[in-house]
Image (cartoon, grey):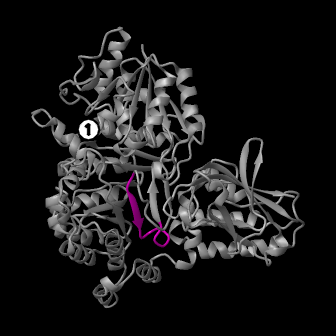
Amino acid sequence: MAKVALICMYDNRALGLSLVANCLRAAGHSVTMIHFKLPIIDNSHDSYLPNPTHYETINTSDPFYSIRHYFYDAKPWVAGDLQALSELLNSLNPSVVGLSTRSALDEKIDSFLTCVRNAVPEATIVAGGFGPTFSHDVYLEYVDYVCVGEGEEVMLDIVNAVERNASPDDIAGLMYLRGGKVIRNELPRHPRESHFFNYATTSIEHFVIEDQKCVPADPLLQNIQLEHYGSNQYFTMLGKGCLFDCSYCCAGKQTSLYKGDDSFSKRRLRQMGSVLEELEFVKNYGMSYITFLDSFLSAPAEYLLTFFREYKKRVGLPFFAQLFPPQVLKRPEIVSAAVDAGMDFIVVGLQSGSDRINKIIFNRPLPNRINIEFSEMLQNYPSLKVQYHLITHNPFVDEEAFHESLDTIRQLQRNNSHLILGRLEPFAGTEIGERIKRASPSELVANREVMDKRTLYYLLRFLQDDADFLPLLKRFDDMTFESLREIARDCWPINKDECGFAAVELGNVGLDLYEVKRNVFDEPFSEAIDTWQRNPNQRSMTLLNQLYNKNMAALDEQPPAEQPSVDLSQPFLGYGWGNVHKNDLGQSWRWLAPGAGNTLFLTAPKHGPMLVKAHIHTATDDSIFKIRVWLDGDVPQDQRIVEENGCFYHAFPLDPANLKNRKLIELRYGIDDPKWDDAPRTVGMTKIEVVQT
């Protein structure tokens, strides 16, 4: 029995690595899975990043024009995270380490790979996933092997070889360096069986590394609170593969690796009994929501109809799935059966509103008339939430394609629906990335301001009727980005007066932070939050704030507590602040930059003078000395950087007598120096403390 450590990054789902883990465990090997950094979405920004690692999205269900940044962009790893990983690997002392990562992290991966190599210098280290598959040169400097393509049986062969003290060099599917040359073995035939689920899963040890700590986790990570996902949400797939080879998707590129393999099929379904057994197991384990991650939940119609019927009887949990529109339009009973079984959320992937762009540039030959007809069909199901996905900032979108997209958006149904705009990020290994490199300047739209303005016009087309939108469209050249944002603000579907408080709906926040919210208030307000939690369709931040103010008025009549309560939890967390919730009061950190809206709301203390201290986590150059805070729009006079026990803090005094009897106060942090305008990541700050002086 060999000892194996498998590491995934920013991935609580880890479906690919779970296949590997299940395959190894079923063969009798000892397996530990390490989740290095948890996925997080930071939807607090009002501008795009200059150099993102992941895609960025705007969602009309979010507060006004708040751009979501994902994973590394939202929460980079730091030295303490790497130290925690190093200590864990040292204690495990595995003979084989498997790493699964994505192309988006290629440019940031050096420090991570160095950490792994130094922690277990004698181990055989194998890297797999889209990143190593398409950027092997980045990884082979640090790892022994890169696994190309599907890897569960390849990893089993490697582990068996290491256990026998044999060389894995001849194993199909591997790349490695010998004598300075890259050796690439032929690909194996695709795996013979699915290792999605077996009961050995429960005997795989799990650890999560987050906030510079290593935490033991249960097999389904239920003891770990995941923002925006929920610890009781379970991810799985009905089968492997996708029907399309979209040029912007790494999965399509990976499929092309198997051209010439007659046994390979783009879409391979699991045995239905195995899927249902898995979902029954996780339901009994405590999961309450199922997300099918198949690009399309496509299968023969009779398979789907039988599956949904059995799912309703044996599982019965609400779920998300993305159905294949052409199939459903021919067999509408499929969507009826899915909704009846519990499907309450679906995505319609437009990608471009121009058929020409979809077909020629995105290699996605699905006419938008199909998507429009599909959106009309979905309106027959009032309980079904619908998202439309559209890719923006595509340099191949000319004026004609821009107007075609506007026309497609105009025809979409809007009841219980939202538009999601994702900025194109051409990852390594994707066809769209290579195509952009090959294109001549005359083929590309390079004007960033035009792309940003078009994004707002897409939003406005979805939000406005013809009478309001068409006159605005005629003024495209005269409109500035800021003026368009103001127009969009006025017709945004979420009450603009609530935006400052609506970072994340309470129902999406982990139970640990939810309990914090209940405990910082007295019983009447806690009951109000409980009611708000139980009625997701009747949530109103305005109502909650009214309840809060009423409760605060009652507290004025009570004697002051020995220690002031500082509420930094979600209902009063500004949309400009991060969403990490690992300390006692739900306090969080984020990168600061000028104009980034680093706004934080907290309850005003009722005692004498206080000192507000923000721990400085990281600083670039002399930016530590440029930090400024605005208190309710004013600049406190006495701001300074202090050092305590080797830690640096930004500190300023807070006197309740100067707060004009406000119950809720606003702090806004930023960098007070014009030269930092183009450097969005200059300072990292962690928990904020309010102490009595």
Apparent side of residue 147 relative to residue 212 in the rendered image (left or right): left
Residue 539, image quadrant: bottom right
Residue 5 to residue 515: above or below? above
Q: Is 611 in front, or is 229?
A: 611
Q: Give the image location of residue 533, x and y in percent.
A: 58, 62
Q: Is 673 in front, or is 259?
A: 673
Residue 692, image quadrant: bottom right
Magenta stretch, residue numbers: 54-66
**Residue sitting at x 25%, y 37%:** 271
Residue 446, image quadrant: bottom left
Q: Secondary structure at mark 1?
A: loop
User: Is residue 496 among what the camera can see?
Assistant: yes
Q: Is 62 a magenta residue?
A: yes
Q: Is 195 in front, or is 105?
A: 105
Work out which quarter of the rendered image holds the C terminus and state it: bottom right
Task: Determine the main secondary structure of the stretch shown in magenta.
Answer: loop
Q: Is 306 a magenta residue?
A: no
Q: Give the crowd class for mark 1: few <14, some 14-19, many >=20 residues within 10 Å.
A: some
Label count reads 1
Apparent side of residue 259 relative to residue 248 in the rendered image (left or right): left
What's the amino acid at mark 1?
Answer: Arg
Work out which quarter of the rendered image holds the N terminus and state it: top left
According to the picture, the residue beneath numbered tag 1 turns out to be: 270
User: Is residue 326 among what the camera can see?
Assistant: no
Residue 226 to residue 520: above or below? above
Q: Give the image location of residue 32, x and y in percent.
A: 47, 26
Q: Give the image location of residue 588, x and y in percent.
A: 62, 54
**Residue sitting at x 45%, y 71%:** 65
